[in-house]
Image (cartoon, rainbow, N blue to C red):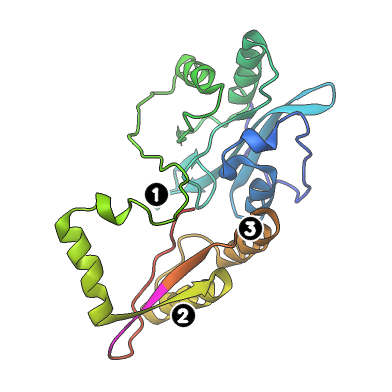
Amino acid sequence: MFSTDRSIEPTIISNQGIDQSRLPIFEQDWWVDTARKSAGFREVTVLEDGLVVGRLAFTVQRNRLGFRSGGNLPACHLGGPALAESLSPKRLAEVLNGLLEQLPNIPFLFTVSAHVSYAPYVREAFKKAGFKHFTQANYLRQPTASRTSNIVGGLSHKRRAHINSADRRLEVREINAEEFISFYSANLEASGRPPYFPLDIAQCTRFYCKRHLPRTSTCDSSTTKDGQDRECQPLPI
């Protein structure tokens, strides 16, 4: 087993062997290319006929005691291997083993999507490599004609009352991603807290989202009635 604990040159690797449209957003090329600029970025790949058919991008970080661990990329709910779906079951297993053999010998924690076609092969390969597996309960809301249809109706009476009361205490206005980053930065500076992940990466993510997503994401900032800004935490995509 050899270590990938080295700096990665900021060269975008083409993954033409992997169907990008079938991947979770956090594993698509443009998102991973943005994360390359973050500290601790690592990536291992498996090639076939000059094309990348397997990729595992991750970050390595140290805790306060200096011990290293690895896992999903910054601000990513999902991670794990990205594979070419055209591979046979036998070849999928071989590619997965090839990726896992390249990982540094440190603890890892990945949250892998159960909605990719090769999810069972990923689970088995990780278990054979010595990883412990557990299932995380999650929820998937299917797209509907209305962005808010059935959302409020599915909340408890207490939660609906909290939302309705917000208008009496807060001024809520819709802002774009760039305005949110500035708003968030000002709150961090005022509170003396570090960002969850580098804000320059957030700016790059905003730029790529604007280029690659059909709809620009917006978020709400809130200000108390007396004019004080409330601290706002980044929302997962």
Judge whether residue 169 can be spotted in this image: yes
Q: Position of residue 25 (x, y in %)?
A: 58, 44
Report the residue that reaches farthest toward the top.
Answer: 90
Identify residue type, mark 3: Cys
Determine whether the residue tagged by mark 2 lies in a helix, strand or loop: helix
Magenta span dominant secondary structure:
strand
Counting labels gives 3
Q: For the point 33% across and 53% down, which residue is it?
A: 151
Name the residue tied to disc 1: 65
> Secondary structure under badge 3?
helix
* Residue 53, x across and y down, in percent: 72, 26
- What residue does disc 2 label? 186
Residue 192 visible in this rendered orientation of the protein: no
Residue lying at the far front of the rendered structure: 145
Question: Identity of the amino acid at label 1?
Answer: Leu
Q: Is residue 110 above or below residue 66?
A: above
At 23% from the left and 53% from the top, the residue drawn is 155
Circle 1: element type: loop
Classify residue 212 as left or right of residue 64: right
Stretch in magenta: 221-225
Which mark is nearer the camera, 3 or 2? 3
Label 1, label 2: how far apart the Cα atoms are: 30 Å
Classed neighbour count for the residue bearing mark 3: other residues with Cα under 10 Å, few (<14), some (14–19), many (≥20): some
Q: What x and y, as percent, mark residue 5? A: 62, 40
**Which label is found at residue 194?**
none
Is residue 223 shown in magenta?
A: yes
Q: Is residue 118 above or below residue 179?
A: above
Give the residue pinned by disc 3: 209
The Cα–Cα distance between marks 3 and 2, rounded to whole angstroms, is 23 Å
Furthest toward the right, the residue is: 50
Q: Nearer the viewer, residue 15 or 161?
A: 161
Indicate the amino acid at tag 2. Ala
